[in-house]
Amino acid sequence: MQKTDGMNYAPEGKSEPVVSDGEFNFAAVALDHGHIYGMCNGLTEAGATLKWVYDPDPKKMEAFCKVYPQVKQASSEEEILQDPTVQLIAGAAIPSHRCGLGLRAMDAGKHYFTDKTPFTTLAQLEAARRKTAETGRIWAVYYSERLHVESAVFAGQLIEEGAIGNVVQVQGTGPHRISTDSRPEWFFNREEYGGILCDIGSHQIEQFLYYTGAVDAQVVHSKIGNYKHPQFPELEDFGDASLIADNGATNYFRVDWLTPDGLRTWGDGRTLILGTDGYIELRKYVDIAREEDGDHLYLVNHEGEKHFALSGKVGFPYFGQLILDCMNGTESAMKQFHTFKAAELCLIAQRDAIRIRPGKIDRVNEQEVSSPVE
């Protein structure tokens, strides 16, 4: 598993099938981001059958087929959409194109599983909301920093059990290594990637809503800036935001593209969850200068102090739940409202952010440079 570059980070877990071979078929369409590998790993480990792959770039398809030799290469996206045995489309398109792919998938009667961020504009979000209401299909999002991290999964289980009481605040850090030489052109084009709060900030907002049990939240304050990469004027390498949930819980998070080369993984992602009766700290990918493995959870409550090393011990239940939701019309993996609310709040945080520049601070409105719904 690639651990130095977040774009190609693809966790592998225990095989825990919820369906038999051929019972639930899916296809991978649009391989623009390496997260497609993590998405496919999770689905196949849960028993789904990866039937097709398509990308306009034959080199990307060739590389994909080396990892998944059982998959068939389609001649076009349309060939996959017309296959009635395919129940779900998994895609990691350029962010500004993800909505368009989802609309086409649902028009073809498929469920849709997209990499984060699912949208780059509020207009796209509203189009997706209308389409799910129209079709009854699931628009799932790969919020991997909670769904595909064992310590984050276990934290949710502890909170549900009441280990720290009611959650009061969630603090999150999502640093990433930028690896500019391996990034595609769209990564540096704000209209295509949506901005840092819209992109990697979406992980942070989703987990805030989840851990607090909030239905809605208000973005109180947000900031974006480019501190280190003036050669890429549309890149934002820093962003942060504060939110207040409808149940009174608060959130602060910071995301950045400033991970130093000396760190052995792509980012020192952490989460601190404060409750009325204790707190939890997650050291998701690395415990710096100490342990080789990530997935460390620290729990402090009235019973004392505990450390859990969770790598390889918890698994990733989301993927099996998603498959069963698609088959049964349920919402056990993630409620559709929650999926879209997390996306909406990151778009609002991006739109209303203060842009920090050397010697200048001004308001920006990201909708002015946003792309239309496809």
Image (cartoon, rainbow, N blue to C red):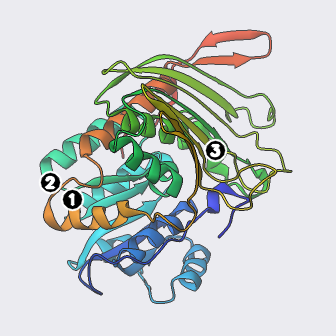
The quadrant of the image that shows the N terminus is: bottom right
| Residue occupying the point 58% across, 63% down | 311
Q: Nearer the viewer, mark 2 or mark 3?
A: 3
Mark 3–mark 1 CB contact (< 8 Å): no
Q: Position of residue 223 (x, y in %)?
A: 60, 20
Going by the image, does 291 lie left or right of 213? right
Residue denoted by label 2: 135
Q: How would you rate the neighbour count of disc 2 (Cα within 10 Å): few for under 14, some for 14-19, many for 20 or more?
A: some
Circle 2: element type:
helix
Q: Position of residue 156 (x, y in %)?
A: 40, 46
Distance (Cα) linking label 2 and label 1: 8 Å
Seen in the picture, residue 9 relative to 227 is either above or below; the reply is below
Which three-letter amino acid code belongs to the residue tagged 2? Thr
Circle 1: element type:
helix
Mark 2–mark 1 CB contact (< 8 Å): yes
Seen in the picture, residue 40 relative to 358 is either above or below; the reply is below
Distance (Cα) linking label 3 and label 1: 37 Å
**In the image, which disc is placed on residue 107?**
1
Depth check, front residue: 77 or 204: 204
Asked if residue 149 shows in the view, the reply is: no
Depth check, front residue: 323 or 210: 210
Going by the image, does 350 lie left or right of 16? right
Q: How would you rate the neighbour count of disc 3 (Cα within 10 Å): few for under 14, some for 14-19, many for 20 or more?
A: many
| Residue occupying the point 81% across, 36% down | 231
Q: Quadrant of residue 360?
A: top right
Counting residues from the start of the chain, the first of labels 2 and 3 encountered is 2
Residue denoted by label 3: 269
Which three-letter amino acid code belongs to the residue tagged 3? Gly
Q: Quadrant of residue 18?
A: bottom left
Q: Position of residue 362 (x, y in %)?
A: 63, 10
Counting residues from the start of the chain, the first of labels 2 and 1 encountered is 1
Counting residues from the start of the chain, the first of labels 3 and 1 encountered is 1
